[in-house]
Image (tube, rainbow, N blue to C red):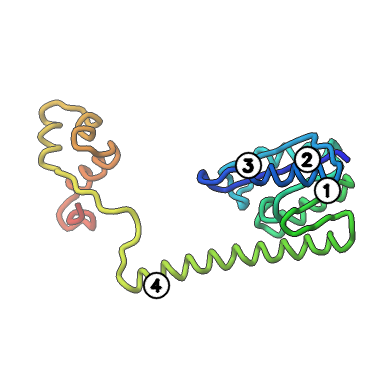
């Protein structure tokens, strides 16, 4: 049986080595011939564009594999709609799916039903995480915590003096240890008319 391995990690601090090692061991035990390895690194499962996953799908459409093996259902994606769409593509080409963590094999009816249930739980887990983050931000605001980037202190007098002496905006920003756009924004704010909403906020 021709097998394709799909590997994915979502952050730079992770790598796909463990997933690959485990799946290659599974392939060897089952006698699968690994004909393709597709690896998306530092790519979230919620993103629509995953280059290697797209290449895998193209291979499925060309019937280059008999089976796709992945570490877990959440490696394939976090959206139930996308997961079920992917399962439909596999079924249309009669390509099976193996998920190592769930011990799932879609060569059976039970395996196909379990895949759909795993997708439901993956989406539910993601919704819970988003809900917790929003609740945490709301609590922080209620407690008076200022959210967003820290305020940048700008020595406007020095900046204006350097500019008046003929130094460029970019060079002045570099001298002050600022980004050019940050200095530009503060200069624009400092020249706002008195009483303007931005006039007192430097």
Q: Which comes before the other along the chain, label 1 or label 4? A: 1
Tell whether label 3 touches label 2 (CB within 8 Å).
no
Mark 2 Cα-neighbour bin, 10 Å: few <14, some 14–19, many ≥20: many
The residue that disc 3 covers is 17
**Rendering coords of residue 37 (x, y %):** 72, 37
- Of residues 145 and 200, the one drawn nearer to the viewer in this rendering: 145
Mark 2 to mark 4: distance in Å? 46 Å
Q: Tag 3's secondary structure?
A: helix
Q: Which residue is mark 1?
A: 90
Q: Quadrant of residue 60?
A: top right
* Image point (59%, 65%), residue name: 127
Decide which of tag 1 and tag 2 comes sooner along the chain: 2
Question: Mark 2, mark 3: which one is toward the viewer?
Answer: 3
- 168 w.r.t. 42: above or below: above
Considering only order in the chain, which callout, 3 or 1, is on the residue closer to the N terminus?
3
Residue at the (10%, 28%) spot, across then down:
165
Q: CA distance from mark 1 to mark 3?
A: 25 Å
As measured in the structure, the alpha-carbon distance from the residue carrying label 1 to the one carrying label 2 is: 12 Å
Q: Quadrant of the N terminus?
A: top right
How far apart marks 1 and 4 lie (CA) works out to 44 Å
Q: Is residue 65 left or right of residue 37?
A: right
Q: Disc 3 and disc 4: Cα gap in Å?
A: 39 Å
Residue located beneath label 2 in the image: 4
**Residue at image mark 4:** 139
Which mark sits nearer the N-terminus, 2 or 3?
A: 2
């Amino acid at each position: 049986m021709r097998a394709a391995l799909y590997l994915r990690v979502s952050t730079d601090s992770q790598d796909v080595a463990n997933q690959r090692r485990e799946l290659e061991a599974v392939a060897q035990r089952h006698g699968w011939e690994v004909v393709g390895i597709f690896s998306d690194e530092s790519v979230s499962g919620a993103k629509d564009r995953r280059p290697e996953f797209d290449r895998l799908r193209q291979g499925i459409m060309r019937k280059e594999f008999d089976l796709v093996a992945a570490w877990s259902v959440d490696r394939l994606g976090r959206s139930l709609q996308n997961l079920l769409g992917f399962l439909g593509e596999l079924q249309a080409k009669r390509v099976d799916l193996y998920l190592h963590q769930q011990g799932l094999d879609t060569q059976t009816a039970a395996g196909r039903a379990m895949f759909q249930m795993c997708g439901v739980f993956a989406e539910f887990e993601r919704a819970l995480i988003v809900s917790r983050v929003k609740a945490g931000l709301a609590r922080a605001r209620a407690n008076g915590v200022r959210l967003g980037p820290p305020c940048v202190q700008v020595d406007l007098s020095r900046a204006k003096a350097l500019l008046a002496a003929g130094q460029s905006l970019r060079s002045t920003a570099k001298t002050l240890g600022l980004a050019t756009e940050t200095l530009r924004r503060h200069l624009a704010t400092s020249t706002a008319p008195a009483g303007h909403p931005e006039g007192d906020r430097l």
